[in-house]
Image: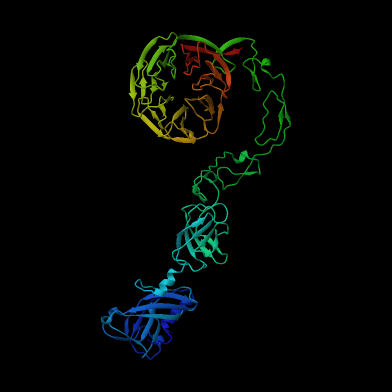
């Protein structure tokens, strides 16, 4: 065996060593052996005297200021017996490239290397060399390097570097695992991966590895590792100081739900990753909140401060003949004086004082369609109807001389009759039941079925437009554009010549559709098993807003102030034009028909027990009720003429009622 003296660092090695003390790294690249004889100063060498071959590095470690580099030489390229006495180690200098870092020479105490013809031969070398306080010391490890059996055994038994995997057994929360390569003891940093066989219960859990003793399972913060799931795979490392196995990469924890987290934000909880659904919908402004008070609106990160002035107490306010104006701001409790004589009987009909409408009638007369009192009902026309059949619409013609409706139970037969005597002008039979109808400014009647749209002239000629399909509700705007809502998940618009203007799609699982047309917007309500979504579209089909809290049912009407009135299923709804708030009025039997006159008076044909026509107030409360003669139940088909006469089928005849509102001069 060769006897090599202490390795000497060459001058180039010393220069690199000096650089390394100030932060430059040392990277050992390879070793070399040679057969040269040298008696001078090894520090001046830049290479071996007589090189034989390179020695690849296969192992590297460091102990304090000393690096330990291992290499193995193979006689693959040796063709004759060769004497070896030189060893050099090389490193990468950032300025010079690869240099001879250290050198040693055994002189006459070297080794002979047999040729490959004598059989494979290898020689291992370990060089221990000073690196000082260098912070970065590395080595280029040859991919063809070898390790000894002992090194390999030590390596695979290192449970800090190698993970043990197993499936747990035992009782819930008192888990056990047996690894095929049993660890001798618990050591600091030891890593195990466990596939849990049963959900853990509340409280602490432990693991007993190969019967070495039960150890607690903890989180990094010291809390118990809870909520372990069956078939879940968890990684733990042992902390020798605390005697616990610590859960690695546990992710998030907590009991938050999607509704607790802002919409679009994500979080990890005990139940896994969730996406927030919480939407801040506050509509308050700074002016709505008292000065110096703080609040949050639609941005959870921005605290806002109110500017509303506190106006202070006002005591008792006495009414006068002129309005008393108070500035904007907050007013604590105050009162407004009242008078027991402020009743309708003390006020002329048509006059009101502080919201109380008078009913004194000194000089009676009648006017139509004025919001001044309760209506007086007068039946002006009636003629035999189609029997126990209801039309879903009664649409008057442009000149209030005729009325359109369906006369059969399947709603396939469309008739045009005179309003006064019911004289039949023409009838038309469609292949499908008519769902709705509307009249344009040119006296054309548009009807819609589930499968198409058809336009009738006043003489009964028609044109069908089926390319876009059909629907349930049809409306016509002031420019004679057609708007259709369909429960199959869409709304669309046609020109008066039947050309599609646009189509808007919504939920395909819509079971029922409702709609209303305003001068500047088309409202569509899409109902499904999960509720109703109301869409506000502009008249070009663009989405303005949606609401899941607003109410819209059936075919609604829109008042001059933009308020939307609609009804269905025994309820009437009042919804503001921005879909922010809705009110509901109950106590009706069907609530399926709703019309209004030119002064926004509302009417419905409905009642709880018997046929009736009802006038409604603006808040949908009952204003006046007319019992309908000959009606066994409520007439749900309903219409109104342009001069304000109500039209309905009282199950035995078509009736027209004049609505006159009392006024006194």
Q: Where residue 502 sits in the image (x, y, percent)?
A: 38, 32
Q: Where residue 354 sits in the image (x, y, percent)?
A: 66, 23
Instruction: Give 406 or 598, whichever is nearer the viewer.
Output: 406
Q: Using the image, determine if residue 377 lies above or below residue 92.
A: above
Q: Using the image, determine if residue 552 lies above or below residue 427.
A: below
Instruction: Give 462 or 254, whichever is nearer the viewer.
Output: 254
Q: Is residue 202 visible?
A: yes
Q: Split into 4 quadrants, where in the image is the N terminus?
A: bottom left
Q: Using the image, determine if residue 627 lies above or below residue 553.
A: above
Q: Using the image, determine if residue 239 lies above or below residue 308.
A: below
**Residue at 40% of width from left, 89% of height from top?**
41
Q: Quadrant of residue 164?
A: bottom left
Q: Quadrant of residue 92?
A: bottom left
Q: How is the image coloured?
A: rainbow
User: In screen coordinates, is 73 left or right of 616?
Assistant: left
Q: Quadrant of residue 616?
A: top right
**Residue at 40% of width from left, 77% of height from top?**
70
Instruction: Give 417 or 442, whichever is nearer the viewer.
Output: 417
Q: Where residue 575 sits in the image (x, y, percent)?
A: 53, 29
Q: Is residue 93 visible?
A: no
Q: Split into 4 quadrants, where in the image is the C terminus?
A: top right
């Amino acid at each position: 065996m060769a006897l090599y003296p202490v390795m000497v660092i060459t001058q180039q090695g010393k220069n690199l060593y000096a650089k390394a003390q100030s932060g430059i790294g040392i990277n050992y690249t390879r070793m070399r052996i040679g057969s040269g004889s040298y008696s001078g100063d090894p520090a001046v060498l830049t290479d071996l005297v007589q090189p034989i071959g390179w020695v690849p590095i296969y192992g590297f470690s460091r102990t304090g200021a000393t690096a330990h580099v291992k290499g193995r030489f193979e006689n693959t390229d040796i063709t004759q017996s060769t004497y070896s006495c030189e060893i050099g180690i090389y490193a990468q200098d950032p300025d010079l490239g690869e240099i001879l870092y250290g050198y040693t020479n055994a002189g006459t105490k070297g080794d002979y290397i047999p040729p490959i013809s004598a059989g494979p031969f290898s020689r291992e070398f370990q060089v221990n060399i000073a690196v000082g306080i260098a912070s970065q010391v590395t080595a280029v490890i040859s991919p063809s390097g070898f390790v000894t059996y002992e090194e390999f055994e030590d390596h695979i038994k290192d449970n800090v570097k190698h993970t043990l995997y197993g499936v747990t057994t035992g009782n819930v929360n008192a888990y056990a695992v047996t690894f095929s390569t049993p660890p001798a003891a618990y050591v600091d940093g030891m890593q195990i991966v466990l596939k849990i066989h049963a959900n853990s219960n509340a409280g602490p859990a432990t693991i007993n590895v190969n019967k070495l003793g039960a150890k607690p399972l903890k989180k990094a913060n010291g809390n118990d590792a809870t909520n372990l799931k069956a078939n879940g795979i968890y990684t733990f490392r042992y902390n020798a100081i605390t005697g616990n196995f610590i859960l690695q990469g546990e992710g998030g924890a907590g009991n938050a739900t999607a509704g607790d987290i802002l919409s679009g934000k994500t979080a990890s909880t005990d139940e896994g990753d969730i996406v927030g659904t919480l939407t801040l919908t506050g509509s308050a402004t700074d002016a709505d909140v008292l000065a110096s008070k703080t609040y949050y609106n639609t941005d959870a990160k921005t605290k806002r401060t109110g500017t509303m002035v506190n106006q202070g107490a006002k005591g008792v306010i006495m009414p006068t003949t002129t309005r008393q104006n108070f500035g904007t701001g907050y007013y604590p409790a105050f009162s407004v004086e009242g008078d027991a004589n402020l009743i309708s009987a003390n006020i002329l009909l048509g006059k009101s004082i502080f919201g109380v409408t008078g009913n004194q009638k000194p000089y009676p007369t009648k006017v139509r369609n004025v919001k001044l009192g309760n209506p007086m009902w007068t039946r002006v026309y009636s003629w035999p109807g189609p029997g126990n059949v209801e039309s879903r619409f009664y649409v008057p013609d442009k000149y209030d001389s005729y009325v359109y409706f369906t006369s059969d139970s399947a709603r396939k037969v469309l008739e045009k009759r005179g309003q006064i005597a019911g004289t039949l002008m023409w009838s038309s039979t469609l292949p499908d039941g008519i769902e709705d109808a509307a009249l344009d400014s040119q006296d054309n009647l548009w009807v819609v079925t589930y499968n198409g749209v058809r336009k009738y002239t006043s003489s009964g000629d028609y044109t069908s437009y089926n390319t876009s399909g059909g629907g349930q509700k049809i409306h016509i705007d002031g420019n004679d554009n057609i708007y259709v809502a369909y429960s199959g998940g869409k709304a669309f618009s046609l020109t008066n010549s039947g050309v599609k203007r646009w189509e808007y799609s919504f939920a395909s699982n819509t079971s029922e559709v409702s709609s209303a047309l305003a001068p500047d917007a088309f409202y569509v309500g899409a109902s499904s098993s999960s509720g109703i979504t109301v869409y506000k579209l502009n008249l070009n089909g663009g989405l303005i807003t949606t609401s899941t809290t607003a109410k819209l049912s059936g075919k609604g009407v829109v008042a001059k102030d933009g308020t939307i009135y609609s009804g269905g299923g025994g309820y009437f709804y009042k919804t503001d034009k921005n879909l922010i708030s809705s009110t509901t009025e109950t106590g009706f039997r069907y609530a399926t028909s709703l019309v209004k006159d030119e002064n926004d008076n509302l009417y419905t044909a409905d009642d709880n027990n018997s046929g009736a026509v009802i006038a409604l107030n603006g808040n949908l409360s009952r204003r006046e009720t007319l019992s309908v003669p000959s009606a066994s139940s409520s007439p749900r088909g309903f219409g109104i003429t342009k001069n304000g006469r109500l039209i309905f089928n009282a199950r035995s005849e078509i009736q027209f009622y004049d609505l006159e509102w009392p006024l006194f001069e």
